[in-house]
Image (cartoon, grey):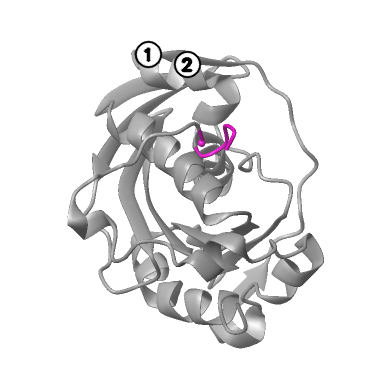
Amino acid sequence: MRVRVATTILGITAALLAVPACSAGTRPDTAPSARTRKPAAAAQQAAPLSAAALETRLLDESDLGSGYLRKPERPSRHDDVTVIGCPALNKLGGDAATGGTLAFPRRAKADFTYGGSSSEVSEELYSDSATKLSAGIGRIFDAMTGCPTYQVVVGGTPIDMASQKLTPPHGLGDEQWSQLLTFSTGGQSTVVKQTAIRDGRVLLIVSGSPALVDRHLDEALAKATATS
């Protein structure tokens, strides 16, 4: 079955990113390359942005250019999720291994298709203290990249997963994480790149077709932090 992997993958990725914080807490990398600088005291103390404020900082069609179409938000689903072969993700819970949103109360999200094809890109924004954002997203990436291969069964559909830690982009924000995920089911495979940048009290996650993530990461961060 061709699971419309292209259209469900971003949900699963988000779901892979969804524990408290795809999110639970250790850093994907404690090496200097994963962190460009320590959170400033002002950023630590600044009040988190509201969900409404985050919504205005998301990219839209006019930012992305021609060929992009925003997808309507889909109603939440609560399929049974089982993780096989990755104890770290099991500890985070099934939702963390399939996709959803991180457990931060202040968040906004937008999904786009490109050129009428199966290429997609998704942007998520969260706001909280620098410490909470760092611990939450770090936990998830550690768990996901700690298991090179595993399987997720969503609503009875098995999805073979492969994860690869990538060198995060340097010089963007305060902390960066990046990984490449391969979802395989029904004889079809889809590759999704996921990059997270924390800048002060704002966490940006861009997921989707690798080329689209690379193309729009800088502008997504610029808009998300324009008045942070």
Looking at this view, name the residue that lies furthest to the front.
41
Q: Quadrant of residue 44?
A: bottom right
Q: Which residue is mark 1?
A: 87
Q: Mark 2 belongs to which amino acid?
A: Lys
Q: Which residue is mark 2?
A: 91
Please indicate whether residue 86 sits to the left or right of residue 60 in the image.
left
Instruction: Give the x, y percent position of residue 162.
Output: 29, 32
Magenta residues span 17-23
Magenta region, mostly helix, strand or loop?
Answer: loop
Would you place residue 90 above or below residue 144 in this image?
Answer: above
User: What element does badge 1 sit on?
Assistant: helix
Q: Is residue 67 visible?
A: no
Label 1 crowd bin: few (<14), some (14–19), many (20+), radius 10 Å: some
Depth check, front residue: 16 or 10: 16
Q: Residue at x 51, y 35 (%)?
A: 23
Please indicate whether residue 12 sits to the left or right of residue 37 in the image.
right
**Quadrant placement of the C terminus:** bottom right
Would you place residue 210 above or below residue 219 in this image?
Answer: above
The magenta stretch spans residue 19 = yes
